[in-house]
Image (tube, rainbow, N blue to C red):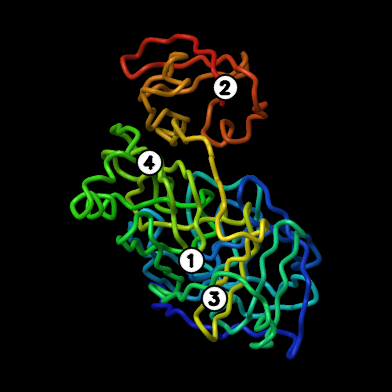
């Protein structure tokens, strides 16, 4: 039996009194940076919603040894005991990190576009950062006052299970607490419980509920969330630290409400751990940002290893084109799709309709032509 591992910040950094500018990529509303370990180059996802690193047991990223076990909470609120592994010594930018630890996740869904995750413990260690997707830079420093003269819209955070939670207002007079989670793609997702509270206090918010369906979509470290009612929201204004995001289309989630890496489309973010503060710096240098994003109206989840429609909105083009809840994808444009990983990796083309061969929940096969 592995010994119990407890969250700690015992990893070490190779530099002191430093400022480093590290190139990043912002792709599909996720943050990626490159590093080196054992003479090999690896791609890391920067995930502030993870308290520490994450390694997928079926990926090629190496680890040195098992440190013990820890109780881990995934994005959907599920809890499981997982092994904790020590990363090899690795370098990002000019900084070498030794003794870094990460949860070792045994999942059939292994990300194809990155090798491992760096979590919020990098900032709990005391490092300040500015994430700027316009200039494609992560500015990392241990100088606690380095960003003091930077202007923006600050919001305090508290740590819950070692990850940051901020308060925001999706409706005047109502406060929601959301995890600042760059591992999540969307700008904002509201928890189902927050929506129920909001509608109880402010029934008028029902005019911003665009529709509902029964299904599931979020995939956490320990599997897909259970099926339940999902609401499609068209939020008029979301206030974060005094900055207004207008016309946001989003959905409810079973886990905690989240502010995801989608916010980085609209501005840079500064993390100041000594003050427990996150500062948003809008690229438009205004007090409000018009989002006007399309609604996410279909979701695919793994089911018995294959890709299945987990939920679909009846007002969507996908529904009009023939997709139904429970459809399993068999092939796309005549190419067999045997696993969920193959579906995720398929080279979809924006604006183009693809031909899907699906098997419905009733066992009947049919063809659907629709965009992805």
Nearer the viewer's eye, disc 1 or disc 4?
1
Where residue 252 sits: x, y (%)? 35, 46
Estimate how packed mark 1 is, as few (under 14), some (14 to 19) or many (20 or more) residues with alpha carbons within 10 Å. Answer: some
Name the residue at 54% across, 63% down. 54
The extreme front residue here reads 287
Q: CA distance from mark 2 to mark 3?
A: 39 Å
- Element marked by disc 4: strand
**Tags 1 and 4 touching, CB below 8 Å:** no
Q: Where does label 4 land, which residue?
A: 233
Q: To which quarter of the image does residue 315 belong?
A: top left
Name the residue at 50% across, 13% down. 368
**Tags 2 and 4 touching, CB below 8 Å:** no
Nearer the viewer's eye, disc 2 or disc 4?
4
Nearer the viewer's eye, disc 1 or disc 2?
1
Q: Where does label 1 land, which residue?
A: 242
Q: Where does label 2 land, which residue?
A: 371
């Amino acid at each position: 039996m592995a010994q119990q591992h407890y969250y700690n910040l015992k990893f070490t950094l190779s530099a002191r009194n430093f400022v480093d500018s590290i190139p990043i990529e912002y792709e599909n509303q996720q943050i990626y940076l490159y590093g080196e370990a054992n003479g090999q180059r690896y791609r890391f996802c920067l995930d502030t919603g993870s308290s520490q690193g994450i390694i997928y047991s079926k990926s090629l990223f190496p680890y040195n040894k098992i440190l013990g076990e820890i109780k881990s909470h995934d994005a959907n609120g599920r809890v499981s005991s997982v092994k904790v592994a020590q990363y090899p010594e690795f370098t990002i930018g000019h900084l070498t990190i030794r003794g870094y630890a990460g949860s070792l996740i045994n999942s059939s869904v292994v990300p194809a576009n990155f090798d491992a995750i760096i979590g919020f413990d990098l900032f709990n260690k005391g490092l300040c950062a500015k994430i700027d997707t316009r200039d494609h830079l992560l500015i990392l420093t241990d100088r606690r006052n380095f960003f003091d003269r930077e202007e923006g819209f600050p919001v305090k955070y508290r740590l819950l299970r070692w990850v940051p939670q901020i308060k925001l207002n999706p409706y005047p007079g109502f406060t929601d607490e959301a995890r600042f989670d760059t591992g999540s793609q969307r700008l904002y997702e509201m928890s189902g419980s927050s929506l129920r509270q909001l509608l109880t206090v402010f029934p008028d918010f029902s005019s911003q509920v665009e529709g509902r369906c029964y299904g599931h979509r979020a995939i956490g470290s320990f599997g897909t969330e259970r099926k339940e009612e999902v609401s499609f929201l068209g939020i008029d204004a979301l206030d974060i630290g005094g900055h207004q995001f207008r016309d946001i289309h989003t959905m409810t989630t079973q886990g905690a409400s989240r502010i995801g890496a989608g916010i980085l489309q609209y501005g840079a973010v500064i993390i100041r751990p000594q003050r427990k503060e996150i500062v948003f710096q809008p690229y438009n240098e205004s007090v409000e940002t018009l989002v006007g994003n399309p609604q996410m109206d279909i979701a695919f989840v793994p089911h018995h290893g294959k890709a299945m429609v987990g939920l679909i909105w009846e007002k969507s083009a996908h529904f009009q084109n023939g997709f139904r809840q429970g459809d399993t994808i068999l092939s796309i444009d005549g190419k067999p799709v045997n696993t969920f990983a193959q579906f995720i990796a398929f080279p979809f083309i924006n604006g183009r309709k693809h031909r899907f061969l699906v098997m419905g929940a009733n066992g009947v096969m049919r063809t659907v032509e629709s965009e992805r």
